[in-house]
Amino acid sequence: MKLRKLAHISTSKEEEGVEEMSMELEEGEILPPEEEEEASQEDPKPVGKRVRFSGEGSEKKSHYKVFEFSGNRYTIEDPVLLAPETKEQKPDIIIIKGITQTIDGMVMVTGQLFYHPEDAKKKGGGNWQIRDTRELFYSTHLVEVPANCVMHKCVVHFIPANKQPPDCRKHPGFIVRQIYDAVEQKLWKIADKDHN
């Protein structure tokens, strides 16, 4: 029995079209690692009905509530890890606030960024004091990235200043106690400002 896998490839940077290439595999045949990765890697796809349009002409975008990538579904308000640009960097964490598809079919994710304490600049210099290695700072800083940068969902616990964080063995995930203002380079307690 033959299995058919399809991979989409672009024949040149100048061409706008996408060519379909099929590879036939015998049952039990294994692809070399780089080919297997390409064949199993799917492009992110919006799911469900379009919610609205924005922009005009080549900037026109379709907005959705859900997208699917690598067999997982992601929705508005999901906290997710983003693939770092280099191996030395930590993954960025965002809460998805928007899912769009451009005219050329690229799915993009807009999200509110969490800052790792060491990445948050402090007015006047120095470092922010943290009480837990799981701690992140929430922000109103929005970023837009290709949806294929999403690695997977994660858990983020918002903890008011007067509460203890959950036991990490029973409730794994990141914790947020403060909101980071990147412009003023200040921290606010969660109770001080609305984080949505």
Image (cartoon, rainbow, N blue to C red):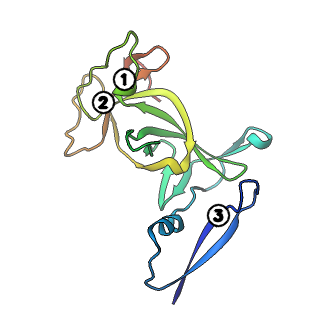
Identify the image quadrant of residue 174: top left
At mark 2, the secondary structure is loop
At mark 1, the secondary structure is loop
Between 85 and 45, the one nearer to me in the picture? 85
Q: How far separated are the C-alphas under marks 3 and 1?
A: 47 Å
* Residue 159 locus on image (x, y percent): 30, 30
Circle nearer the viewer, 3 or 2: 3
Q: Which numbered disc, 3 or 1, marks the residue that appears first in the sequence?
A: 3
Q: Is residue 84 above or below residue 176?
A: below
Say if mark 3 contacts mark 2, CB within 8 Å.
Answer: no
Q: How far separated are the C-alphas under marks 1 and 2?
A: 8 Å
The amino acid marked with disc number 1 is Ile
The amino acid marked with disc number 3 is Ile
Q: Which residue is mark 1?
A: 190
Say if mark 1 contacts mark 2, CB within 8 Å.
Answer: yes
* Residue 163 locus on image (x, y percent): 24, 27
* Residue 81 locus on image (x, y percent): 42, 44
Q: Which numbered disc, 1 or 2, marks the residue that appears first in the sequence?
A: 2
Question: Residue drawn 74% across and 42% down?
Answer: 60
> Position of 73 compared to 126: left or right?
right
Label drawn at residue 9: 3
Q: Which numbered disc, 3 or 2, marks the residue that appears first in the sequence?
A: 3
Between 157 and 146, the one nearer to me in the picture? 146
- State the residue lying farthest toward the right: 57
Label drawn at residue 159: 2
At mark 3, the secondary structure is strand
Q: How far separated are the C-alphas under marks 3 and 2?
A: 46 Å
The amino acid marked with disc number 2 is Ile
